[in-house]
Image (spheres, rainbow, N blue to C red):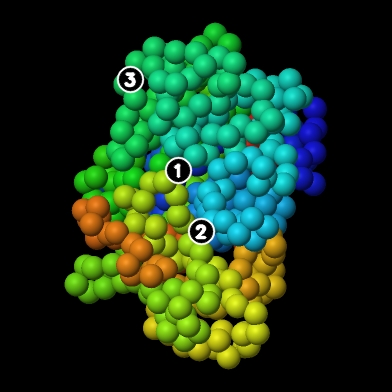
Amino acid sequence: MILNVNNRNYATPKHPTVVVCVDGCEPDYLAQAVAHGRMPWLKRVLAEGTALIADCVIPSFTNPNNLSIVTGAPPSVHGICGNYLYDVATDTEVMMNDPKWLRAPTLLATLAEAGASVAVVTAKDKLRKLLGHQMTGICFSAEKADEVALAEHGIADVLGLVGKPVPSVYSADLSEFVFAAGVKLMQQAKRPDVMYLSTTDYVQHKHAPGTDGADAFYAMMDSYLGQLDALGCVIALTADHGMNAKTAMDAQPDVIYLQDVLDGWLGASKARVILPITDPYVVHHGALGSFATVYLPAGVDQAPLVKRLAAQRGIESVLTRAEAAERFELPADRIGDIVVVSERSTVIGTAAARHDLSALDAPLRSHGGVSEQRVPLILNRKIDGLDMNHRWRNFDAFDLALNHAQ
């Protein structure tokens, strides 16, 4: 059967198919772990399967990219342009966790409607309702695995199934729970036809590629992926974004406090700076990322302001609404008058007084900009004839897994 979702065709699976989104997986994490002998399964897959480097969507944050992966489309189609936005209609700043913000159907829901058995396991509960929107099947988060109910989540007693306690949201255990649950679901007599697993980037925010903490995480992941492979699954592995150190030479966060800058230029609170990285889990990153959108007061001449901002140290690009919507494939009605992207080692904040960085217990690592756009796209099946010069996207994962790797 062929399904059309957001103007892309997908075949229904012949084999159990697992798409994995590893949160914050800069490709070098894999390279270093393989080099250190910590990922034997992946080393084999890189040699015998299909290994690509893809681009995630910008802003390189969790919600836009997870929804791009499950819709097979950029934010201009599905509407989720950040973890957080300014709702002009209600004059409020809100989390984009509610499915009301979603403008396109997901492939997961369409597969389920067509009769496929579908399961979704996500680390953080903030994604669950978006990923499971209008989907019949199993959908739960590791974060709230003790609160599942058959009617809402399609499964009961997840803790009994997995054999692990509810993990801390600030731990590698949260992601391990996702993988462990995925393996247990695939070991059941009635296993899912399609499964989507989405982890958390707690480890990547704290540990650089090749460090002991990072290698231990990827060794754990490798073991579970090997188990899924042994169960006969087609596996597509990608990421929502990369990760980079965002520090000055003294190891302190290198921050451009954009609201303070604009308040100095335009007057207090005349402009409104929105940081789409903002979510309930600020211990990871202090709500500091490399992408911001700015709503300007009426009458401001944008051209000289754009030029002045672009000249600031640490700024990579400043785009008008129309330019950002076109370049980054964003919904123009959900971003500000201008979009600001910082350089690889720099993050953007609002006002210094609004960011509590006291919980950061390691040098800041974060994401959001073009510098975190490169991500892995790996399949455990050899796909011949792929154009290696094509611009692959992380949201090609289901296309490759269902249409080419079966």
Numbered disc in front, either 3 or 1: 3
Q: Quadrant of the N terminus?
A: top right
Check disc 3 and report the residue beneath it.
164
Check disc 1 and report the residue beneath it.
22
Q: Is residue 207 above or below residue 337?
A: above
Give the crowd class for mark 1: few <14, some 14-19, many >=20 residues within 10 Å: many
Contact between labelled residues 2 and 3, with CB atoms less than 8 Å apart: no
- Which mark is on residue 276? 2
Disc 1 is placed on an element classified as loop
23 horizontally vs 209: left or right:
right
Give the crowd class for mark 2: few <14, some 14-19, many >=20 residues within 10 Å: many
Q: How many angstroms separate mark 2 from mark 1 (CA)?
A: 20 Å
Numbered disc in front, either 2 or 1: 2
Q: How many angstroms separate mark 3 from mark 2 (CA)?
A: 33 Å
Give the crowd class for mark 3: few <14, some 14-19, many >=20 residues within 10 Å: some
Q: Position of residue 190 (x, y in %)?
A: 58, 11
Residue drawn 34% across the image and 25% down it: 166
Marked residue nearer the N-terminal end (2 or 1): 1
| Nearer to us in this view, 282 or 54 | 282
Q: Is residue 333 above or below residue 279?
A: below
263 horizontally vs 97: left or right:
left
Q: Position of residue 273 (x, y in %)?
A: 50, 69
Three-letter amino acid code of the residue under disc 3: Lys
Q: Is residue 96 above or below residue 160?
A: below
- Which mark is on residue 47? none
Q: How many angstroms separate mark 3 from mark 1 (CA)?
A: 21 Å
Residue drawn 62% across the image and 64% down it: 335
Disc 3 is placed on an element classified as loop
Numbered disc in front, either 3 or 2: 2
Three-letter amino acid code of the residue under disc 2: Pro
Residue 289's quadrant in the figure?
bottom left
